[in-house]
Amino acid sequence: MSGRALVFDTRYFLHLFYTKDQIRLRALRELAENTQPKWVSAITLMEVYKVTSELEGREEAERRSSLIQQDFRVRAVDAEVATAASALQAMAGLSEAEAIVAATALVLRGTCVTDDPHLRGLDALQTKWV
C-alpha cells in the first residue's frame, strides 16, 4: 500500500506487542509491512517507552523505541501539530496524547491507525483498523 500516509497510534503498538491472538498479530504486522509512508508521533514513542518500561524494563523499552524509529518516520510535536492538537483537545475533549496523535495525522493529511473510540469518532480524522 502506498499513497496516503498512515499514522500509527500508540494502541497499535500495544496490540502488536501484547496481543496473544495470532490472527490479529499477523494482521497488525502485515498492515505495517505493506504501508509506505508510515509515521508515528513523537508522543507515541514516549507512550510505548513508558508502558514497555513499566511492564518489561528499560532495556526492552529502549529496544522497541529503536525498532520503531528504524521502521517509521517520527513526526515531532512542532508548532503546527501543537496548535492543531490544542484545537482538537478543546473541541473534542481529547487527552493531550490523543490530540497530538490526531493532529499529527491531520497535519500529514494521513489516516490514523487506531482502535481508540475517541479518535475514531472525530469527523475530521480518517481512521483505519485491522
Image (cartoon, rainbow, N blue to C red):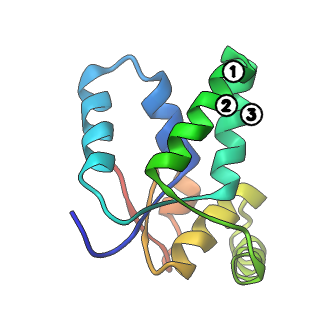
Quarter of the figure with residue 92: bottom right
Identity of the residue drawn at 21% across and 63% down: 1
Q: Position of residue 38 (x, y in %)?
A: 41, 60
Q: What's the CA distance linking mark 1 and mark 3? A: 12 Å
Q: Which dot, 1 or 3, sits closer to the camera?
A: 1
Q: Which mark is residue 50?
A: 3
Mark 3, other Cα within 10 Å: few <14 / some 14–19 / many ≥20? some
- Horizontally, residue 42 falls left or right of residue 102, namely right
Which of the two residues, 87 or 104, is positioned nearer the viewer here? Answer: 104
Dot 2, how many residues are within 10 Å of its Cα: few (below 14), some (14-19), or many (20+)? some
Q: Amino acid at mark 3?
A: Lys
Question: Which secondary structure, mark 1?
Answer: helix
Residue hosting label 1: 59
Residue at image location 42% in from the left, 23% down from the top: 19
Where does residue 110 sit, x and y in percent of width and height?
Answer: 43, 74
Where in the figure is residue 97, as x and y percent of width and height? 72, 56
Taking depth in this image into account, of 53 and 21 the one nearest to the observer is: 53
Q: Amino acid at mark 2?
A: Glu
* Residue drawn at (72%, 45%) of the image: 46
Q: Are marks 3 and 2 in contact (CB under 8 Å)?
A: no
Instruction: Quadrant for residue 85, please give it.
Output: bottom right
The disc placed on residue 62 is: 2
Q: Position of residue 122 (x, y in %)?
A: 53, 71
Mark 1 and mark 2 in contact (Cβ < 8 Å)? Answer: yes
